[in-house]
């Protein structure tokens, strides 16, 4: 199912980003935890936004009705 | 402080652990110690002499001296500004100068400068006077010369006429007049300069005062002259007044004085005139060279001051701050030590001890300073170690209120959620890219901008550059989700999910298109743009999205209150605040979110308004066609009951339990007082002194809890509604940008005229930048700010702490400018 596939992609991107942040700026456990929190929060925000928009179009109750002019 | 170790420490989530330290510093190394501590900048001294006036303090004299030196430096700066010099920006390599040497040096320099100024002023005055004198000589000389020549011409004419006697029109009295030389009245005269604007009044007054018995001749000087008295450029007239009699003379002199007219002696004798002119010119030349030499000397002096000005300024400021800090320390009874108390972060202890040690060694002190940690009940200041990226986000939080010591810092989540919520309202990747470019400009030229002084608005934009960067990045993301590039959609992620129902596409404008494949994979399907059902679709989507995002963020806030309760070991808050709050919010709005998602996923046509309203009005009624899933009615009943229970759960147990706890503690305290009377009484007293005896007033606690509960219950509804601003603003943004695109750019394009097109593009760019990029950014920023300050932070944030202001040399410059 496309929804779960894209969700998986989001998860992978999130994991990848946290790894990159961890490798690029490793400055002790407490700073790393901050970076991890930020990456996770950002990933969840982005995923939520996408998921909401995707789900809203998943089984639409209304369809696009084109304008007369077009 | 109760410090629960509920979770691994996270940077920025809790403010740095602080302790109150006491330093006992020997008198001889005190100054050096304080200045070393100022270099570290991690200790905030307490004023231990708060009851003493500034003049009663130990180092009042030194501060006065520093103030005097600062005044001299300001004087130098003024002089340099007047001379158009600026102090060299980079402080030269600093050989350590002693304050006493500097004081002497500054004194000498000031005296020298004052003397030079006085001399040059005096010289300038003389020069100006001579200049005026010269002008008078020239102008009056011309006048006398022309008068004399005309007089001689007349005389000659007359003589010629006398020779040729018999003319009828020759006046009868002529002979008498000119021949009788002895009877001629001796006329006196005064010459000088009068300001041009006063010259008319001057003339009138003179005329009246002497009843017309005078002759005034004025002549305009083309160029303004420097007035000797004021040193300013004034337009002046040269005048010569002829009068008769001593009385008139004294009157004229008085009038001259009143009008500020400078008088200069003038001789009638031509040769004498020439002689004085020569003399005056010679003197002028001399003075000119003297003045120039003086100016060069002054310039050199100021230049040499300018080289070291910044260094001296820094030194004086530092010394002043050191003495200021020393004044806050209390003197030991033996007058051999100073006692300092102050807050410092725990991590800085080693640094501070190291500095104390170095200071003791460097000042050859026999005893080192003593460093010890004091126990106190006072709440320590809040100190977050931020970097240039996180500091601007922390400032957003601090603007609302500085965090209580070690409470969960919303700044951590603000770093992501603030720009995210902004971007939900500002979703357009075209505008996002514009914002990104502007921000990148600031970030790339960061070094240059941070060293120079900027205007108010520029300073604010520059300070928030990393906030802007995050905002721009998230706007680009949400722009892709909304599928808007300056309001134009693109088929980047594949074809649209909708197609015509039949090949002719005849009913696309009446019945609409039909969905032929899976939903558009990323973001809003481009086909919606410009369709008749665009607004109903987007409104429904954005409204529901606002609620989902809002419920998620409010839940995050409540969860943070759990972390606070755990951290401070406050189990009352966990069980009687966090748990019922979480249940209440999710029983109502968590359930609404669930319904929204369920409806989307199932494609049901149930009316969610109806469901939510009748959940309260008649919970036992059958849902009918609005049923989304089996057992919905039971679930609703359970949720409603939970929500109803959680209100008294929030309200009642906490104050009652607090009362019980207090009574238990009080009883226990009474026991210890009786038993260990001697050993603990001292501690108790100290505690009382610093903390005071806290009275437990049940009614106050109860009312406080009542307010808190009402606020939360009502807030759950109003805050959820408040998140709808996300929908409103994002709608406004997309509508505005599509209006600008359709009604300006496309309209101009349709005329097929280059000029109209250019005008259209200019209008479009101005509208986009002015309205969408500036105004909309501001409004979306403010709304995101509100959502964080009110809707998010009121779930957990107390914000009644105070900021850590360490004594630091690094922050001296910012304060005074």
Image: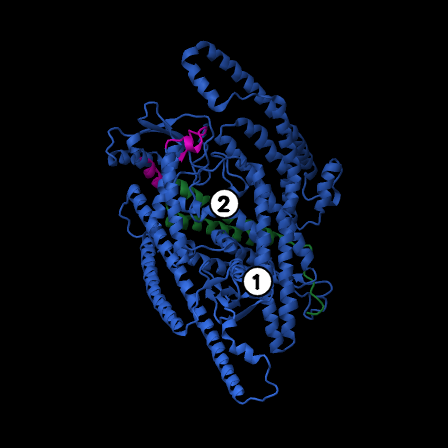
Image coordinates of residue B289 in percent, x first then y, are 33, 65
Q: Is residue B809 visible?
A: no
Range drawn in magenta: B33-58
Can you tell which mark lies on residue B160? none
* Residue at the extreme top of the image, as rendered: B675
Q: Can residue B50 be found in the magenta stretch?
A: yes
Q: Which residue is at a point 55% across and 65% down the rendered structure image?
A: B199
Residue B747 position, x and y percent, is: 65, 71
Which chain is blue in the picture?
B
The quadrant where residue B215 appears: bottom right
SS class, disc 1: helix
From the image, state the color of chain A: green
**B641 versus B811 height, above or below:** above
- Of all chains, the one bearing label 2 is B
Q: What residue is shown with label 2? A: B395
Name the secondary structure under disc 2. Answer: helix
Q: CA distance from mark 1 to mark 2?
A: 27 Å
Q: Chain of mark 1?
A: B
Between B332 and B163, the one lying in front of the other is B163
Q: Cβ–Cβ below 8 Å for labels 1 and 2?
A: no
Which residue occupies the foreground of this view, B372 or B117? B117
Magenta-drawn stretch contains B745: no
Disc 1 target residue:
B769
The quadrant of the rendering that contains the N terminus of chain B is: top left
Residue B210 screen position, x and y as percent: 58, 63
């Amino acid at each position: 199912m496309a929804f779960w596939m894209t969700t998986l992609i989001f998860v992978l991107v999130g994991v990848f980003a946290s790894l990159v942040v961890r490798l690029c700026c490793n400055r002790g456990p407490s700073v790393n935890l901050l970076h991890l929190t930020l990456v996770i929060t950002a990933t969840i925000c982005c995923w939520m936004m996408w998921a909401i928009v995707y789900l809203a179009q998943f089984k639409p109750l209304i369809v696009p009705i084109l304008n007369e002019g077009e | 402080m109760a410090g629960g170790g509920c979770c691994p420490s996270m940077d920025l989530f809790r403010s740095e652990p602080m302790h109150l330290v006491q330093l006992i510093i020997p008198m001889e190394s005190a100054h050096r110690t304080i200045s070393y501590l100022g270099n570290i900048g991690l200790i905030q001294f307490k004023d231990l002499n708060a009851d003493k006036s500034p003049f009663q303090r130990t180092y009042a004299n030194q501060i006065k001296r520093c103030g005097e030196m600062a005044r001299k430096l300001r004087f130098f700066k003024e002089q340099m500004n007047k001379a158009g010099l600026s102090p060299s920006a980079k402080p030269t390599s600093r050989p350590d100068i002693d304050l006493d040497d500097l004081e002497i040096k500054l004194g000498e320099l000031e005296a020298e400068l004052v003397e030079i100024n006085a001399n040059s002023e005096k010289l300038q005055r003389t020069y100006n006077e001579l200049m005026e004198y010269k002008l008078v000589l020239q102008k009056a000389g011309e006048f006398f010369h022309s008068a004399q020549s005309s007089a001689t011409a007349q005389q000659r004419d007359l003589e010629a006429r006398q020779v040729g006697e018999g003319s009828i029109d020759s006046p009868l009295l002529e002979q008498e007049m000119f021949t009788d030389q002895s009877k001629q009245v001796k006329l006196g005269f005064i010459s000088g300069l009068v300001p041009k604007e006063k010259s008319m009044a001057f003339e009138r007054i003179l005329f009246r005062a002497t009843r017309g018995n005078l002759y005034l001749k004025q002549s305009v000087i083309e160029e303004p002259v420097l007035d000797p008295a004021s040193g300013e450029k004034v337009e002046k007239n040269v005048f010569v007044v002829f009068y008769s009699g001593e009385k008139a003379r004294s009157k004229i002199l008085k009038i001259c004085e009143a009008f500020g007219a400078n008088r200069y002696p003038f001789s009638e004798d031509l040769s004498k005139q020439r002689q004085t002119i020569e003399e005056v010119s010679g003197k002028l030349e001399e003075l000119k060279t003297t003045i120039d030499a003086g100016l060069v000397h002054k310039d050199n002096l100021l230049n040499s001051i300018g080289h070291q000005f910044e260094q001296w300024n820094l030194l004086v400021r530092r010394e002043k701050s050191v003495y200021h800090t020393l004044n806050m320390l209390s003197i030991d009874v033996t007058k051999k030590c100073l006692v300092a108390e102050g807050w410092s972060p725990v991590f800085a202890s080693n640094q501070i001890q190291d500095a104390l040690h170095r200071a003791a060694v460097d000042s050859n002190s026999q005893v080192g300073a003593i460093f010890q940690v004091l126990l106190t009940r006072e709440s320590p200041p809040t100190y977050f170690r931020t970097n240039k990226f996180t500091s601007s986000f922390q400032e957003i939080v601090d603007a609302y209120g500085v965090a209580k010591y070690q409470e969960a810092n919303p700044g951590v989540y603000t770093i992501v959620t603030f720009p995210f919520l902004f971007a939900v309202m500002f979703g357009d990747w075209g505008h996002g890219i514009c914002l990104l470019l502007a921000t990148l400009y600031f970030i790339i030229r960061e070094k240059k901008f941070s060293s120079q002084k900027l205007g108010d608005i520029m300073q604010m934009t520059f300070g928030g550059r990393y906030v802007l960067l995050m905002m721009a990045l998230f706007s680009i993301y949400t722009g892709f989700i909304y599928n808007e590039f300056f309001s134009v959609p693109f088929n980047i992620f594949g074809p649209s999910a909708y197609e015509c129902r039949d090949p002719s596409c005849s009913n696309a404008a009446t019945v609409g298109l039909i969905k032929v494949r899976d939903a558009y994979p990323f973001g809003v399907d481009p086909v919606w743009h410009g369709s008749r059902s665009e607004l109903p679709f987007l409104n429904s989507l954005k409204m529901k999205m606002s609620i989902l995002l809002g419920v998620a963020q409010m839940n995050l806030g409540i969860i943070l209150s759990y972390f606070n309760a755990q951290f401070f070991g406050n189990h009352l808050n966990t069980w009687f605040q966090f748990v019922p709050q979480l249940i209440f919010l999710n029983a109502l709005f968590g359930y609404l979110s669930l319904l929204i998602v369920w409806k989307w996923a199932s494609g049901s046509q149930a009316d969610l308004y109806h469901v939510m309203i009748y959940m309260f009005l008649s919970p036992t009624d059958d849902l009918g066609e609005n049923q989304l899933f089996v057992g919905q009615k039971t679930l609703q009943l359970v949720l409603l009951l939970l929500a109803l229970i959680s209100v008294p759960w929030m309200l009642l147990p906490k104050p009652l339990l607090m009362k019980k706890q207090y009574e238990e503690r009080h009883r226990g305290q009474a026991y210890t007082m009786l038993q260990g009377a001697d050993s603990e009484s001292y501690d108790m007293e100290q505690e009382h002194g610093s903390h005071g005896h806290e009275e437990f007033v049940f009614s106050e606690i109860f009312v406080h809890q009542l307010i808190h509960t009402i606020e939360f219950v009502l807030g759950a509804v109003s805050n959820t509604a408040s998140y709808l601003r996300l929908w409103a603003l994002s709608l406004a943004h997309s509508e505005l940008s599509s209006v600008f695109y359709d009604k300006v750019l496309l309209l101009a394009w349709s005329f097929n005229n280059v000029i109209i097109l250019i005008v259209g593009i200019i209008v479009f760019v101005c509208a986009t930048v002015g309205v969408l990029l500036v105004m909309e950014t501001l409004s979306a920023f403010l709304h995101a700010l509100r959502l964080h300050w009110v809707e998010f932070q009121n779930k957990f944030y107390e914000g009644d702490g105070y900021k850590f202001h360490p004594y630091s040399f690094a922050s001296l410059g910012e304060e005074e400018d």
